[in-house]
Image (tube, rainbow, N blue to C red):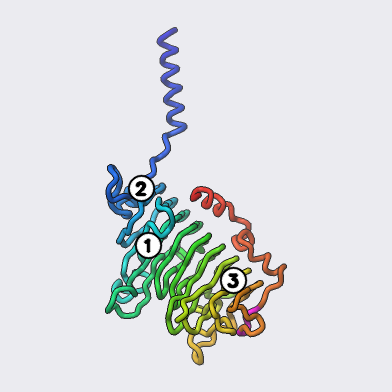
Amino acid sequence: MKPLLVALCIAGSLLISAAAPAAARDLIVSSNQTGAYRSVQAAIDALPSGGGIIRIAPGTWREKLTIDRPRVTLIGTGEGPAATILVYGDSAKSAGGTFNSATLTASGDDLRIANLTIQNDWWLVPGNPPSQAVALSLTGDRAVLTRVRLLGHQDTLFTNKGKGGRMARHYFSNCYIEGHVDFIFGNAKSYFHDCRLHGLAHSDVWYTAQSRASADEDSGYVFDRCRLTADPAARNISLGRPWRDHARVIFLRTRMDAQVMPEGWREWYPGTSKRLPTTDYAEYASSGRGAAPAARAAPSRQLTRKEAATWSARSFFNGDADWIAAGLKALR
């Protein structure tokens, strides 16, 4: 009987091991830690096809990054998002087009990022000509970002549909995003909660350039309890202009400390294009010196409380918002 018992015990332990594999280790990126990866992209490439968690030590990591697999998590390990900086300096002129210029291009689903900075510093290099220069290009579905700084000038953040035109959903919480021309742009379902949007000194500042292409397309940008600021030298500040005819942008309970132009919204090419009449631009309970509900350009509208409730995150994502809570919990 003893050999049989031994065999049964061994078989049982093998079954348990098969049913509960050991959790994958987090990958570490550090310039001096033993066993750590020396670049962020090397750590991304080392992840299994199912993704994983990468913890990035404080410092400046000058790399052009690509994430094309699902369930990748990037977490800065410093005291705040300014301690860990992912930066590169490409532009539409140097990289062969706006969509090739991003410091981080992320097409994998279920991306999660926390406590770091993503920057495109093309405009900071003396002698570089003005150009679109993307910091983050985001086209995967169910992305969650919290406590992230996105730094650029023109076209800082691109959020758009994924491969084959599949709609992509993104949630930003407690993030800081800066730029001047069209610095949040694209065509996705993107929700921004408790974020600060900062306009840099420039002759014109457009916070958004959303590009919803048809009236029946389920996309748009919603800014809930955000704050708009700008450099003192920023001029002609507007909430946005329509990159496509049916652009949709909603501001809810947003404090507009920047001196937004009274009309709020501007035509893509004033005097030439005629996109504003078919846009879906709206506000609810804007406050601050940039709030001017009575002066806003038609056909933008002021929402009632009941109408504003239909733009909650859960409503905006058609009742499918559990991925947001799961992402924020994982990034605490």
**Kind of residue sitting beneath label 1:** Leu
Residue ID at (55%, 52%): 323
Q: Which mark is residue 269?
A: none
Does residue 12 show up? yes
Q: In which quarter of the image is residue 34?
A: top left
Q: In this view, does 311 lie above or below 11?
A: below
Residue to which mark 2 is pinned: 47
Residue to which mark 1 is pinned: 104
**Kind of residue sitting beneath label 2:** Leu
Residue farthest toward the bottom in the current orientation of the protein:
271
Residue bounds of the magenta highlight: 297-301
Q: Is residue 77 above or below residue 184?
A: above
Residue ID at (30%, 71%): 95
Residue ID at (38%, 57%): 83
In the rendering, at what x and y percent does residue 237 appear?
51, 81
Q: Give the alpha-carbon distance from disc 1 to disc 2, as whole Å.
A: 17 Å
Mark 1 lies on a secondary structure that is strand
Q: In this view, does 56 lie above or below 216?
A: above
**Kind of residue sitting beneath label 3:** Arg
Mark 2 lies on a secondary structure that is loop
Q: Which mark is residue 255?
A: 3
The mark lying in front, picked from 2 and 3, is: 3
